Image: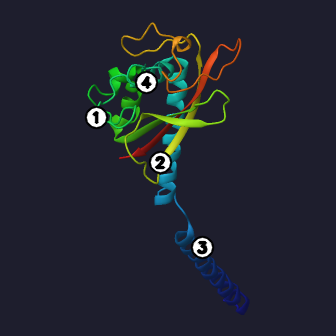
Amino acid sequence: MSVTDDRAQAHTLEAFAAAILLVAGLTFALQATAVTPLSASTSNQHIENQQRAVASDLLATSAENGDLEAAILRWNPDNGTFAESPPEVDGAGYTRADGPHGFDPALGGFGEALNRTFIDRQIAVNVDLRHYNTTDRIERRTTALIDMGEPSNNAVSATRTVALADDANLTAPDHGESTLASLSDGDFYATETGTGSDPVFAYVEVRIVVWRM
C-alpha cells in the first residue's frame, strides 16, 4: 500500500469519526432541550383547548335546537329562583349535578348535554348569565344558573349570547303561559332593555366555565 493510500484511509477514518461525534452531539442537544407533546405543560394546554372547544360547541348546538333558551327561561317569578333549584341554596341557581332532581329534568336538554359532556367525565361546570339590570343598559349583573364551586386555575370558558324575545314563554312548571313582556318589573332576573317596536326583551350572555374535579 502506498503512502497516498495510507493518507486517504486516515482522512476517511477522521471524517467518519467526526461525523459520529457530530450526530451524537446533536442527539444529546435535542434530548436536553426539546419540548415534546408529552410534556406536562403541552399536555395540559391541549386538554384545556379541547375542553374550551367542546364547551363552545355545546353552547352552539344547544342554542340552535332551543335547549339553551329553554334553560335560561326556567325561571319561577313567584320566588325569584330557577325552577326546582335546591331550596337550601343561597342563590337562584343550581349547585350540583346530583341536586334534588339532577340537571336532566331541571334543565331539560341543556342539562342532559352538560351531564353527558362534562359531569359524567368528572368535569365541574359553572354557568353564569350576564345581563343588563337597568333599562338604560349601563349596569350589567351576573345571575348564576349553575354554581358548582370555585373554578381551579386550569378552568376554561366559552360564551354565547341569546336574544330573548318579548313573547318568549317561561319554561318553569305552572308558568308556561307567562311571556316575558307580561311580567311585572322585577319578576325576571334580567330587566327589559328593548324599546318601542323592538321585539327583543333582553340579551343574555351565557358563560360556561369548566374544570376537572
Residue type at mark 4?
Phe
Which residue is drawn at the image coordinates 60% and 73% (left, top)? 26
Cα distance in 3D space between marks 3 and 4: 54 Å
Q: Is residue 176 above or below residue 144?
A: above
Q: Nearer the viewer, mark 2 or mark 3?
A: 2
Residue 140 visible to the viewer:
yes
Mark 1 element type: loop
Give residue 16's position: percent from left, percent from top: 62, 79
Query: Looking at the image, do the residues carrying marks 1 and 4 touch, with CB atoms under 8 Å apart?
Result: no
**Residue nearer the viewer, 70 or 180:** 180
Which residue is drawn at the image coordinates 48% and 21% (left, top)? 187
Cα distance in 3D space between marks 1 and 4: 23 Å
Q: Is residue 145 above or below residue 73?
A: below
The residue that mark 3 highlights is 26
The residue that mark 2 highlights is 155
Give residue 170's position: percent from left, percent from top: 46, 14
Which residue is drawn at the image coordinates 69% and 15% (left, top)? 198
**Residue nearer the viewer, 36 or 213:** 213
Q: Nearer the viewer, mark 1 or mark 3?
A: 1
Q: Residues within 10 Å of mark 3 (few under 14, many from 20)?
A: few
Mark 4 element type: helix
Mark 3 element type: helix
> Looking at the figure, which quarter contains the N terminus?
bottom right
**First-in-chain label (1 vs 3):** 3
**Residue nearer the viewer, 178 or 29:** 178
Cα distance in 3D space between marks 2 and 4: 20 Å
The residue that mark 1 highlights is 88
Q: Nearer the viewer, mark 3 or mark 4?
A: 4
Q: Residues within 10 Å of mark 2 (few under 14, many from 20)?
A: some
The residue that mark 4 highlights is 110
Residue type at mark 3?
Leu
Query: Looking at the image, do the residues carrying marks 1 and 3 touch, with CB atoms under 8 Å apart?
Result: no
